[in-house]
Amino acid sequence: AQSVTQLGSHVSVSEGALVLLRCNYSSSVPPYLFWYVQYPNQGLQLLLKYTTGATLVKGINGFEAEFKKSETSFHLTKPSAHMSDAAEYFCAVSGGTSYGKLTFGQGTILTVHP
Amino acid sequence: DAGVTQSPTHLIKTRGQQVTLRCSPISGHKSVSWYQQVLGQGPQFIFQYYEKEERGRGNFPDRFSARQFPNYSSELNVNALLLGDSALYLCASSFEGNTEAFFGQGTRLTVV
């Protein structure tokens, strides 16, 4: 079985500040890890993914995440927040016999203040 | 190229009724998955189909069923609707079942 825990259901930052959204996972097999963003009343858009190889993954819109196996973490960061980053962010895991099944965290709502 | 398309975008049903949601995957994608997203929560996996075969099923009652057609489009059916079935239903497609998933905009189902 796999699971994802996102620490902090709400994160608030000022425009230009560092964004850090935390994700810890549990998986009995090598995981594939994903971050998705969801804007109100819309579907999910993939920000970035880790499958194998380099543990620091760069995604769209200036976001990046680092896979740390020893800490079972995959935290999402962005050096400088923009107002357009305000949205809900979901961390997800898949792998093993359930490659096609994504298990999502509860989500973190990011608010960006001017 | 068109992305994943879902229809309808919104619908309202009465308790006890049945509903069918439709999904067209990205051209060339052979796998379709369905997720339920209740307000304030992350999406929950319902089904995955690959090459018209069910590959996985989440922890949902038998009232939920799905199928995939020869053109790889898919339908999700929910019978005997309950108030708790109110949610955003998301469809995702991928080239194969274990590659990157692309999501549609979802169908917002309200059960009254």
Image (spheres, rainbow, N blue to C red):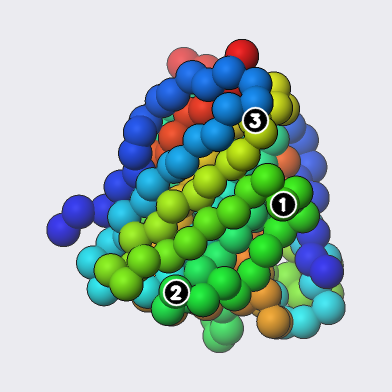
Q: Can you identify the residue that label 3 sits on? A: B81
Q: Are marks 3 and 2 on the same chain?
A: yes
The chain under label 3 reads B
Relative height, residue A36 to residue A49 (above, below)? above
Q: Secondary structure at mark 1?
A: loop
* Earlier residue among tags 3 and 1: 1
Q: Quadrant of the N terminus of chain B?
A: bottom left
Going 73% across and 32% down the picture, which residue do you hit? A9
Q: Amino acid at mark 1?
A: Asp
> Looking at the rendered structure, which numbered label has been put on residue B52?
2
Mark 1 belongs to chain: B
Q: Which corner quadrant of the image does residue B24 belong to?
A: bottom left
Residue A74, position in %: x, y? 68, 61
- Do the residues indicated by labels 2 and 1 lie within the same chain of the protein? yes
Q: Residue at x 73, y 71 (%)?
A: A68
Residue assigned mark 1: B62
Q: Give the crowd class for mark 2: few <14, some 14-19, many >=20 residues within 10 Å.
A: some
Residue A12 can be seen in this image: no
